[in-house]
Image (tube, helix red, strand yellow):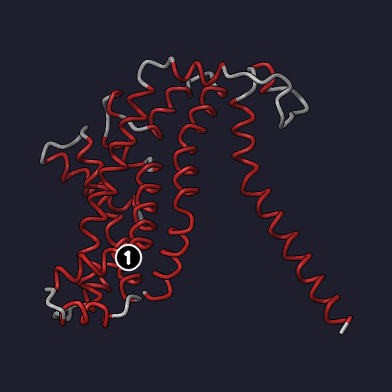
Amino acid sequence: MRAMKKKKLIRQSIIYILVALLLIFVLFPFAWMVSIALKTPEEQFRVPPTLLPSHFTLQNFLTLSQHPVFIYFFLNSILIASTTTLLVVFVTIFCAYSFSRLKFPGRTSLLSIIILTQLFPLAAIIVPIYIIMSRVGLINTHFSLIIAYLSFTVPISVWLLRGFIQGIPPELEEAAMVDGCGRLQAFIKIILPLSRPGIAATAAYIFFVSWQEFMFALTFITDEYKRTLTVGILDFVGQYTTDWGSLMAASVCICLPVFVLFLILQKQLITGLTRGALKA
């Protein structure tokens, strides 16, 4: 009995040590980024380096606020990520419900095609999408980015929501339809309220992807005032010098909305993703 307890204690200790090492590995880059953002230029290159600044300063964030177009970068990112999220959720909730509840010819083939689209890297589709956007005159507009983001967020969102909706017992809809509801009414009154964790998880995932996307934003947008944050922070990287303090401060501003959103929706995000994965 003591031997079993000892083995269990050793196993738990090993797990805790591994988790602690993983947390250090994951959190250290962010901690170093914050540290640089709060240091003076002289202290940023001090040898040996220190994680905690000896003299805290907010000058890097002040410099960031005085940047002539940084506020435009932030607002553009908010607009594009939010619009993409709303459009994808609106479209995919109906698609996921159709694939989950309705039987129609080619359903299995369409699902296979949807998941196969995830095998293509974004670098393989950026040129065709750029050509299409150029021909319809949408290059250097936010619409081009939103449409491009739809191309690779809709498929995975359909799979996530489909898996979640499949976990809702069909008997609940059948009972509602017996009571006089149509299929659309049953969908609105039964499926949508019960799908809130899945919808929140999907929306958070789409927002994360759209917020931090770089390659399409760099390629499709040429006007400085229309750039997103991920591209705009390149202004702090020069040919011969780099303003590391402002660059790290801008990186902190990019990460904070994602962290706040995750803290608010972490329960729904984990529930939606794991349930969708198990039912898909």
Above or below: residue 96 compared with residue 19: below
Q: Mark 1 points at which residue?
A: 195
Q: In this view, does 108 lie to the left or right of 50?
A: left
Q: Quick check: 150 left or right of 74?
A: left
| Above or below for 274 versus 125 | below
Circle 1: residue type: Ser
Rendered location of residue 214, percent (x, y): 38, 40
Q: Is residue 74 placed above or below 125 in the rendered structure?
A: above
- Residue drawn at x 27%, y 58% as measured from the top left: 154
Front in this rendered view, residue 260 or 57: 260
Residue that protrudes farthest toward the right in the picture: 2
Q: Residue at the bottom extreme?
A: 1
Q: In the orientation shown, which residue stands out farthest toward the front?
A: 179
Q: How many marks?
A: 1
Horizontally, residue 54 falls left or right of residue 191, namely right
Within 10 angstroms of label 1, few (less than 14), some, or many (20 or more) residues? some
In percent of width and height, residue 22 lies at 66, 55
Q: Which residue is drawn at 26% across and 55% down?
A: 89
Q: Quadrant of residue 156?
A: bottom left
**Residue 99 point in image, percent of width and height:** 23, 73
Between 204 and 234, the one nearer to me in the picture: 204
Residue 88 pos. (x, y %): 25, 54
Quadrant position of the N terminus in the picture: bottom right
Q: Identify the residue at image location x=89%, y=81%.
A: 2
Observer-nearest of 159 and 197: 197
Location of the C terminus by quadrant is: bottom left
Q: In this view, does 38 lie above or below 137?
A: above
Disc 1 element:
loop
